[in-house]
Image (tube, helix red, strand yellow):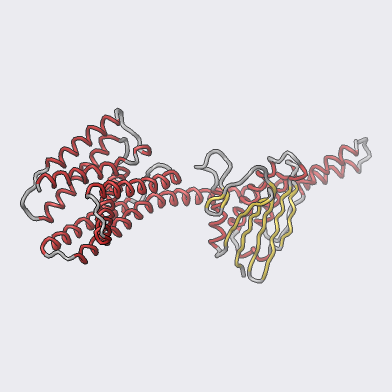
Amino acid sequence: MILNIHFTNLIIMCQVLLGSHMLYLYLEKREHCVFRIISSCILCLAYAYFLPVVNTDYILYGMFMYGSFFILAWLSLLISYQENIWNLLFCSVSGYTLEQLSSAVNELFMEICRFLGFTVPNYAGLLLTSTVVFVCGYTLLRSYLKRYGKISIHKKSLLLVSLIAIFVDILSGLIMGNLLQQNYQPDYRLLLLFYNFLACIFILCLQLAILSNKNLETELSIMSHMLSEEKKQYQMSKDNINLINLKCHDLKYQIRRIRNSQGEVDRAALQEIENEIGIYDSVARTGIPALDVILTEKSLICEKADISLTCMIEGEKLRSVADTDIYSLFGNALDNAIEAVRQLPDVSRRNISLNIKSHGKLLMIHVENAFSGSLEFEDDLPVTTKGNHDFHGFGMKSMRMIAEKYGGCLTASANNHAFHLKIMLPVE
């Protein structure tokens, strides 16, 4: 019996270590990392196997055993990786959760087999269920890390909740186990196993939420910074365009004066200068100052890049939208369209259309442009085609955030090499 307990402790420690170190590829290693992992794991396994079995309170002994296993697994991570203690605590909690989940799944599997009349050797069932649980757990954690990058714990409170939850689960399991030893009831045992299983699933989901929460906070921070910068850019663009218009108006007046003078002047050259300057005097007038600024600014860019920008605008109801939001919304939409059509070798295909129409209390915004190549979509938004995914691709997300801010929605689609961006805003 003593040998069996020692061997059981060895298996538990082995699973905890496996779960804790399974994110090896995503952690920054110390020098001689592999040697550190092997040596620390050997010491942990030796401790687990030779841990004395004391005839004392079952619950206290169990908490001491599980607590010491957890601390040793965490120390093994601290010895092996150059990461902060919170990231490594995340790994230990994940490892311990998978060990507890593996134990619960194994017990449920054995109970089902007994109910169906199958005889499965204990260790064969343990090997099968442990393999399934750890492979699924690793696949799930890896998919989140591939999507959100390296482990970085921002919400330490959530991690502490996970830690507390797993020890509450262990404590309740020990209490129920002690009661079952005194009065075995199969129904109670199944209830305990289902509770343990659901508790582990909850903790694992909480761990995944920690990873995604970090990503959402990062994206929100970047988008907030972008919106702040766009507010400054909007004011600068407005001032610059007003200044340009004023200067161009003066220049056109001076040119006309020279042309009407009695001196010999190359009138064709003056006409060409006047036409060129006229481009900068063609200010968009929609009745919405912020939209006028962005359309004028983007029209100049399109003119220089041989891009045709066609606008059909009923923008009266945009008055309920803040100027900075208008600038950000249409600025990002037109920037994306300009970037896409600029890459087209056929100048005749460099067309962008912007339509703003009102339908009752709804404002429909539709931007359409051609593009080359193919587009991939994630979360119903196109994935950035730029190389650095860490700093690009937030324009579409910021547009969606603005649309949702006003109770609207944003959708994007692509077909026949035409990209369609549709925004619906409820307005008064």
Q: Where is residue 236 in the image (x, y as percent from the top left)?
A: 62, 47
Screen quadrant of the C terminus: bottom right
Say left or right for 179 vs 373. Answer: left
Residue 225 rendering spot, x and y as whole percentages: 50, 48
Residue 28: give x, y in percent of width and height.
Answer: 35, 35
Q: Residue at x 53, y 57 (%)?
A: 401
Question: What x and y, as percent, mark residue 67?
Answer: 18, 48
Classify 69 as above or below 176: above
Residue at image x 32%, y 43%? 87
Q: Nearer the viewer, residue 56 or 135?
A: 135
Q: Which of 303 and 206 is in front in this view?
A: 206
- At a point 45% along the width and 48% down the height, the residue shown is 218
336 on left or right of 119: right
Q: Quadrant of residue 78?
A: top left
Front in this rendered view, residue 134 or 152: 134
Task: Using the image, determine if residue 302 lies above or below residue 402.
Answer: above
Q: Say which residue appears at 65% left-offset and 43% top-offset.
A: 339
